[in-house]
Amino acid sequence: MLARAGFVLAALLLTLYFGRILLTRPPFLSDDESYLLLSLKHYFAGEHLYTQVTSQYGPFYYIVQKAVFGLLRLPLTYDAGRLVAYIYWILSSVFGGLFIYRLSKSMTLASAACLATMWLERVLSFEPNHPEEVVLVLLTAGCLVSVNPSPVALMLLGAIGAALVFTKINIGILFLAAALIASVCVLPAGRLRNIGGKVLIVAMVAGPLVLMHHFLSAWARGFCLMGILAGVSVVLAGMRAEVFSPERMRALQYIAVGALAAAILIVLETTVEGLPLNGLLYGVVLGPLHHPDVFSIPFVVTKEMALLAVLLSLGVAGLYWFPGRRSGRSWIGALKCLVGILVVGIWVQRNIDYTIPPSFSFAFAPAYALLPVVLLPKMGARWTLSEFFPRIFVMALAATQMLQSFPVAGSQVNIGAAPFLLWAFVCTHDGADELFDLFPITKKVHRRIGATSFIGVMLVPIIAVKMVRTEIRLQRKPTIASSLAGSTSLHLPPDQEMEFEAITRDVQTNCQILFTMPGMGQFNFWSGVPTPDGFNTDAWMKGVPLEQQQHTLQILQNNPSACVIYRPLMVTVWGVPEGGIDTLPLAHYILHDMPTVFARGGYEIRVSPDRRAPWVERSPAGTP
């Protein structure tokens, strides 16, 4: 027992150290990080979301962040924002480990799950303060809650779904869809269950088609097929599984009560803050409908990948309908374990490029077709309710959350894959005994320390090596501790640090208001120079309504000391509206009326045409 406790402690310490290193040595500074910090700053100051503060996300994220920053008494800085992201990252990894421990009772496999979740979600270090960090905690918490499907736990599951809806509506709907699938599959055999299953199958086909209909003629056809295969196969497997439940399970009622109660509380909180209901409706529902038109990164599924997914789905279907499946063949369990180890291995070995290409192609996508494997019962036995519910839920959650990568297949791919990774660990545990019993040499290991624990002991060093190698590689790169305000924890490349310092000093000396094109709010934080207003998204050229852009334009025109930092390269990355950038009055004013007084490293500083004061350029030493 002492050795296992030491094993868990070592894994936890490595998790803590890994997260700290990645957050202090960012490969790049995401525009999303500064945009969200700026939106939090205006929100904390009492300005209203959506009418005074532009945001693409729901109010729950802002309510939670306000509570966390207030409870910890943190200022709004890069250092504090990354500390909060670190807390979320660790918490989600611990929840993932606890979920596996509750199912397997193996401390070593739970440690491996904790490390694997930390490794998988290292994308959080790319864009701290993004709502995805809150989403990840809620997803892993939902998996943990599902282990004990009591009335209180089910109501909490519904509350988590509501919180996700009021953070990112697409993710919330997908979460509640997974809860609905699990609820229908635990209903007793009868008419209601049969009708519910058929409705779910139709929904699993229609959902991806409706979601991606604008892009089906382009890149989304393969991704849509993947989503349909995963969703339909999960429902069919859940409906075919045999569950022993002596009592009628009313999961859906409890989940609905929890979701409704949480939704009412969130709406009441926004009302107290002065947000009108029409503003809430826009921020939660209507605004997100336009997101695919603002920015997208394709999730490319090749014909070969689609064909492989179809073949895998047919193979899994054969296992369910194979006549001898219930004849006590242990190879079914062994197959489950091998599938789980394979998926864990894919995610552990997968490297994330630090640059964002115009499209993503993920070789792991066909593995989602294997999701129903987890519900193949051991030796033909029936599942108990406590065994079945967390398995059907995590399987359904993995299938639905894959779709959150539409329309932006960036960090969302890894966030949405968290339930998929946990599903793989469940498969590994469920089939470990059967796999080890197939070979005489592994039978001895099975009898001594347990097959599940042994696999955990093997996985932890493999994951740890990947993490340590990443840490060593990052620490070898030449960096210096940043002297930029509120960013002392950051270690940036020396040339980048000097460039940022030069821009910041000039802005501090010469500007009273600072706007950026596209949104680069880090310069507002580092210089202390305020923004014109709360409309400061990174992709404001396409994401901010024209009337709000007009408000910003008027402030810039009325202030001779107003400045704009312009970065041409990133404007093309974030995209421009149809007709070109000059169709926007605000952009036209910046590009054609504001003269350039500073140019360095792809950045330009432009000033008001009414400026009378001379531009003072600061020396590297910081003196005029």
Image (tube, rainbow, N blue to C red):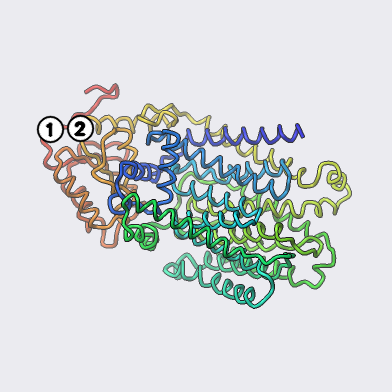
Q: Quadrant of residue 306?
A: bottom right
Residue that mark 1 sits on: 613
The reply, left or right, for residue 560 in relation to residue 21 is left
Pointers 1 and 2 in contact (C-beta within 8 Å): yes
The reply, left or right, for residue 606 in relation to residue 285 is left
Q: Quadrant of residue 296?
A: bottom left
Quadrant containing the N terminus in the rendered view: top right
Which residue does the image show at 60% across and 76% down from the upper left? 195
Res 313 seen here: no
Whichever of callouts 1 and 2 sits on the residue coming sooner in the sequence is 2
Which residue does the image show at 33% across and 49% down from the upper left? 273
Residue that protrudes farthest toward the right in the picture: 440
Quadrant containing the C terminus in the rendered view: top left
The reply, left or right, for residue 352 in relation to residue 33 is right
User: Which x, y percent locates residue 257?
Assistant: 53, 61
* Residue nearer the viewer, 495 or 29: 29
Res 333 seen here: yes
The reply, left or right, for residue 231 in relation to residue 482 is right
Q: Amino acid at mark 1?
A: Ala
Element type at marker 1? Answer: loop
Residue that mark 2 sits on: 510
Q: Amino acid at mark 2?
A: Asn
Element type at marker 2? Answer: helix
User: Which x, y percent locates residue 73?
Assistant: 42, 33
